[in-house]
Image (cartoon, helix red, strand yellow):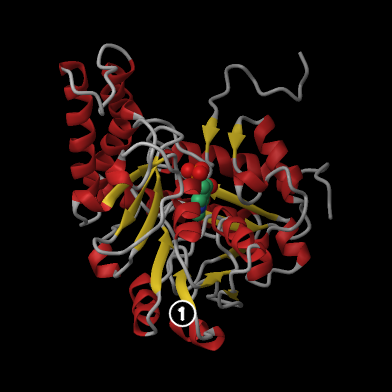
Amino acid sequence: MNSQCPNAMQKRIYADHAATTPLMPEALEAMLPFLKENFGNPSSIHSWARKSREAVREARATIAKCINAEPEEIFFTSGGTESDNWVVKGSSGGLLVSSYEHHAVLSAVASEARRGRGVVYVRPKVGNGGGYIMPERLSKVWTDGIGLVSVMMANNEIGTINPIHLLSEFAHKRGALFHTDAVQAVGHIPIDVREMGVDFLSASAHKFNGPKGIGFLFIRKGVKLEPLLNGGQQENGLRAGTENVASIVGMATALKVNFDQMEENTAHLENLTSRLRDGIDRIFPSAIYLGDGVAGQLPGFTSVSFPGHAAEGLMHMLDLKGIAVSTGAACDSKNTQISHVLKAVNATNEIARSTIRITLGSENTVADVDVILAALKRILRGAGNDII
Ligand code: PLP
């Protein structure tokens, strides 16, 4: 047998939860009837439709409750990318966005810029304790005519959490609407759209143990947004297309379970993360943590650089040992250029090229962390890793 292959008996460890999460059994169970016998189209009139319609109604109410919204403020979409595109393309006026947004925002903004819309970028604070956006930074770049400010709630590469209530207040005082891409945050940290003062909030189910290809957009009551998709009258005439009933039900179930277990999950993940970092510090004292500042980080999130060791090599060697981590955003993993997020926080080329992202989830255990540490020790202290 090829000694490079993972041992068939070896337990595989998934530590890439910022890329996607496993579907929780409760969500799958709740979805199955809508993939089998309850297949009615919620828009039909007959009795087949009633169950589907009722399920969608209930799911909307459940999701609204978890984020302190009203049910009619929740609009189902195909995921984070669609929610982000909808807000950017359906809004009007100039755009002010952070330079370390996910490409779902940045590429939509670039497309709007090509159509002549004004765009201003704000960089996160850099240096020690950096990686987040404060109102002072928005104020530095503010220009007249900005209609929408979009700053993510938590960054997907370094896990930093932004003070959304301060940023939305800043935007509103200047007459602009405020959107936050909360794809990495929903289901993991408390979300209260009223306290946060947001007009729009994007979420995606596969980041909180729900199914892929489903998400939602919160649109504050009374705020106008042009539809992205035109067609039937679904979602109050604002998002056409037959509802993905099973996935909507799975998403609501996953969010509710995570919402109910949030305190417990956070404590568990904080415990695992400190064990992981203590271990890393012992194995490799010159490791550098990104986004590890005063702003706070998502539970379970570690973005760490091992100077002298190429991240790609580390990731592949861990993969051979059955451990999944990543070298930045999942959608960027085929891109050999330095990530725009690490660039935005001023990471040097060497740090950026040696940074891996280890994102733990609630199903990870202390034993998993110890296996990851043992593997890192062998790789980092052993010969054969490609030095930059
Ligand atoms: N926004 C952020 C911050 C993300 O991390 C992601 C996915 O990685 C997205 C948007 C896109 O979400 P989706 O995969 O549901 O389209």
Give the camera-side residue of 209 and 248: 248
Label 1 sits on a secondary structure element that is: loop
Give the vertical position of 108 relative to 381 (above or below).
below
Q: Mark 1 = which residue?
A: 134
User: What residue is rendered at 69% in x and 67% in y?
Assistant: 343
Q: Name the quarter where the C terminus is drawn.
A: bottom right
- In the visual, does 340 lie left or right of 132? right
Q: Name the quarter where the N terminus is drawn.
A: top right
Give the vertical position of 135 relative to 150 (above or below).
below
Q: Can residue 85 be seen in this view?
A: yes
- In the visual, does 168 lie left or right of 6? left
Q: Where is residue 76 in the image (x, y as percent from the top left)?
A: 34, 42
Q: Position of residue 172 (x, y in %)?
A: 35, 79
Q: Where is residue 289 in the image (x, y as percent from the top left)?
A: 59, 63
Tag count: 1
Q: Does the residue labelled 1 lie within 8 Å of ligand 1?
A: no
- In the visual, does 66 lie left or right of 346? left
Mark 1: give few (<14), some (14-19) or many (20+) Cα within 10 Å.
Answer: some
Give the vertical position of 171 relative to 340 (above or below).
below
Give the camera-side residue of 53 and 25: 53
Q: Where is residue 349 in the image (x, y as percent from the top left)?
A: 77, 65
Q: Is residue 17 visible?
A: no
**Quarter-wise, where is residue 109 in the image?**
bottom right
User: What residue is rendered at 32% in x and 34% in y?
Assistant: 248
**Quarter-wise, where is residue 288 in the image?**
bottom right
The amino acid pointed to by label 1 is Met
Give the camera-side residue of 7 and 352: 352
